[in-house]
Image: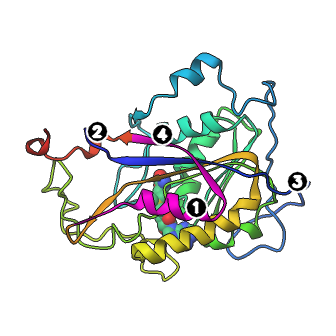
Amino acid sequence: MIKEKKIKKYTVKKPDCVKEETSAYSMVTTSPTKKLDIGFRKICNCQNSHINCMTAKEWLKSQIGVWQFYYEGRDVRDKNLHPATFPISLSKKIIELFTHEGELVLDPFVGSGTTLVAARDLNRNAVGFDLQAQYVDLCQKRLQQSSLFSNAKQLAVLDDARNIPDYLEKASLSLIWTSPPYANLLNRKRKNKSRRDRDNEQLGKVEQYSQDPRDLGIMEIESYTKAMGDIYEQLFPLLKPKAHCVINVPDMWWENKRITIHVSLIEELRTRGYELRNIIIIWDTDKLPAKKWLL
Ligand SMILES: C[S@@+](CC[C@H](N)C(=O)[O-])C[C@H]1O[C@@H](n2cnc3c(N)ncnc32)[C@H](O)[C@@H]1O
């Protein structure tokens, strides 16, 4: 069995009560003085007591602990565009599990905007943040393609995840879903040890997003874990009661030691008030190691 990535799901204690949405907000490049104009209330007819729009049968089918995904034409697979994306199908599955139509999803590390594309397909409002202008541009390009729905908004914001509370109302989020930087896993020359096609064009390249000191992808595991804890602690009051938080991370090898990023994050987020509810293993067949390594 190969464990590629682990997802951690958290529910939260009851935060403050809901405030009304405030006035409009346009192009976002610096910290705003007003909150974003984006909806967060359920617009479907399903029961308020349910956490999603699924039938009981669909819910049961989704309870399997190992997930496998397919990629589609709209997925960003070009590492020159973005080095670490996840598939739209994964993002859609998470959003369908933890939100209703019209509710608000946050991706604090949005990258190429996969979460926003998935939210748009599912008629959910969504906001994503990233430090890099080129990725926010890429999000906007992907969102230009036509959509089935028009009553939900998806916004990409160029800013540090540490500033998110400036943009969003308290108790407005139903889901925080992201694949954050994986500490400094990418901030070194690739050896491709876990790839089938080892000798590909990525071999020997550093595929880190940036060397910006605010970028969590240049931090060693200890400072990375604390930075994630600080960001998620600030996000806590933005969550509705019983909202969910899902984080997609791999573990990694560093100088012959196994670094268990998922364990560090679980422990850190628990100290910040989150409760662990589940771990799901994602089996990404794209990242299977060379056949000779398989048992
Ligand atoms: C693993 S990628 C996200 C990829 C995304 N799931 C996708 O499908 O494209 C992590 C992203 O976090 C961004 N990032 C790193 N530090 C950040 C920070 N402090 N605030 C906001 N974004 C940050 C990086 O620029 C990078 O695009």
Query: Closer to us: mark 4 or mark 3?
Result: 3
Cα separation between marks 1 and 3: 22 Å
Mark 2 or mark 1: whose residue is earlier in sequence: 1
Residue assigned mark 3: 17
Q: From the Cβ of disc 3, is ligand 1 less than 8 Å away? A: no
Instruction: Give yes or no for contact between labels 1 and 3 (Cβ–Cβ under 8 Å).
Output: no
Instruction: Give yes or no for contact between labels 2 and 3 (Cβ–Cβ under 8 Å).
Output: no
Cα separation between marks 4 and 2: 13 Å
Mark 1 or mark 3: whose residue is earlier in sequence: 3
Q: Amino acid at mark 3?
A: Cys
Give how far across and how far down residue 196 sits, in percent: 16, 47
Q: From the Cβ of disc 1, is ligand 1 less than 8 Å away? A: no
Query: Closer to us: mark 2 or mark 1?
Result: 1
Assess disc 4: are there few (<14), some (14-19) or many (≥20) residues with their C-alpha within 10 Å of its C-alpha: some
Query: In screen coordinates, is 260 left or right of 64?
Result: left
Give how far across and how far down residue 68 sits, in percent: 38, 34
Instruction: Give yes or no for contact between labels 4 and 3 (Cβ–Cβ under 8 Å).
Output: no
Q: Amino acid at mark 1?
A: Leu
Q: Amino acid at mark 4?
A: Leu
Is residue 150 at least partly visible in the picture?
yes
Residue assigned mark 2: 285
Cα separation between marks 4 and 3: 31 Å
Return the mark for residue 90: 4
Mark 4 or mark 3: whose residue is earlier in sequence: 3
Query: On the rendered image, what quadrant is the N terminus found in?
Result: top left
- Most extreme residue toward the left is 292
Residue assigned mark 1: 269
Cα separation between marks 1 and 4: 23 Å
Q: Which residues are magenta?
A: 257-281
Is 40 in front, or is 155? 40
